[in-house]
Image (spheres, rainbow, N blue to C red):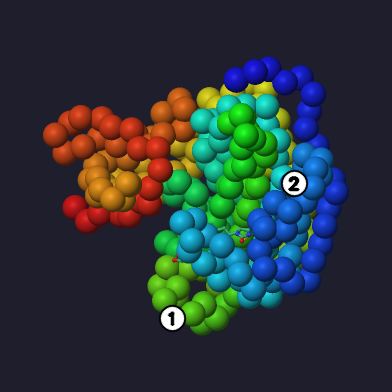
Amino acid sequence: MSPDPVPRVLGQPWVELDVVESTNLEARRLAREGCPEGAVVLAARQTGGKGRLGRAWFSPPGNLYLSVVLRPPLPPAQAPQISLMAGVALAETIAAVAPGAQARVKWPNDLWLGGRKLAGVLAELETTAEGALAFIILGIGVNLVTPAGGFPAELREIATSLQAELGQAPPRGACARALVRVLERWYNMWLRDGFERVRAAWEVCSITRGLPVAVRSAGELLLGVEQGIEPDGALRLRRPDGAVVRVLAGDLEWRRG
Ligand code: BT5
């Protein structure tokens, strides 16, 4: 990681929109037009909110839909660490804006509360023709006000919001500002000191630490016990035969027994 003594400032410019297809698409458009690092796009709702791998993100009015343009001076291989960094920043933000809420990270990009998914992170990177990192769009969705019964049937058992868990939710704008400030601190720490502090904080906050999990990765189902995060951001899994393997991308599920 190259030392970077110049602190990065996030949140300038700050673009607030009522409705957008996806804040990630809007932020990517700005990035391609050459906007400065730190540009934030915040929307009141999305008509085509995106998850990973072409999945949809349910985006009714009132929740948090935010994307930040980042231009870290790093090789693309280090980019996946940014989702983990965002997870740590999200957990810290939720603890600050909703005292009493103990949100936990779930590999690779979820935030869970009360046994359900409260927030998700979608980091999309674009490279130059030479293969260098041009920019990363860090997109974050947090369910603030959707009541338990307000999620579509297929999400009702797996999704939650601060309103559903705590009976109230902090205002969207205050949440967004708090999140960007916390993100800025973790981002600068990551650029200056490397991934280690993010890794350590992520492990403390992991909802599956030491538990049996199943990870779907590249068409394979890997069973094992979650053993934390490797120094480069890969998930460490102890297989039933004792071998420890690294998983770089995939989806993690709990496993019974
Ligand atoms: C994610 O994908 O969790 C990343 C979500 C990122 C959303 C933000 S909102 C701002 C920015 N702009 C965008 O267009 N996107 C980002 P993934 O790990 O693939 O999880 C997607 C899965 O989560 C879906 O297939 C559903 O099962 C579930 N899901 C969908 N909407 C949800 C919601 N609102 N709350 C909880 N779970 C949801």
Q: Quadrant of residue 133 in the image?
A: top right
Report helix, strand or loop for mark 2: helix
Q: Quadrant of residue 120 in the image?
A: bottom right
Q: Quadrant of residue 197 in the image?
A: top right
Q: Nearer the viewer, mark 2 or mark 1?
A: 2
The location of residue 185, given as percent across then percent down, is: 71, 35
Q: Residues within 10 Å of mark 1 (few under 14, many from 20)?
A: few
Q: Quadrant of the N terminus?
A: top right
Q: Which residue is mark 2?
A: 31
Specify whether 47 is left or right of 76: right
Residue shown at the point (33%, 33%) measured from the top left: 246
Q: Is residue 110 above or below residue 150?
A: above
Query: As drawn, which residue projects farthest toward the left?
Result: 241
Q: Amino acid at mark 1?
A: Ala
The location of residue 100, given as percent across then percent down, is: 59, 56
Q: Which mark is residue 153?
A: 1
* Cα–Cα gap, marks 2 and 1: 36 Å
**Counting residues from the N terminus, which is met first, the one under dot 2 or under dot 1?**
2
Say if residue 255 shows up in the picture.
yes
The location of residue 33, given as percent across then percent down, is: 79, 47
Specify whether 227 is left or right of 82: left
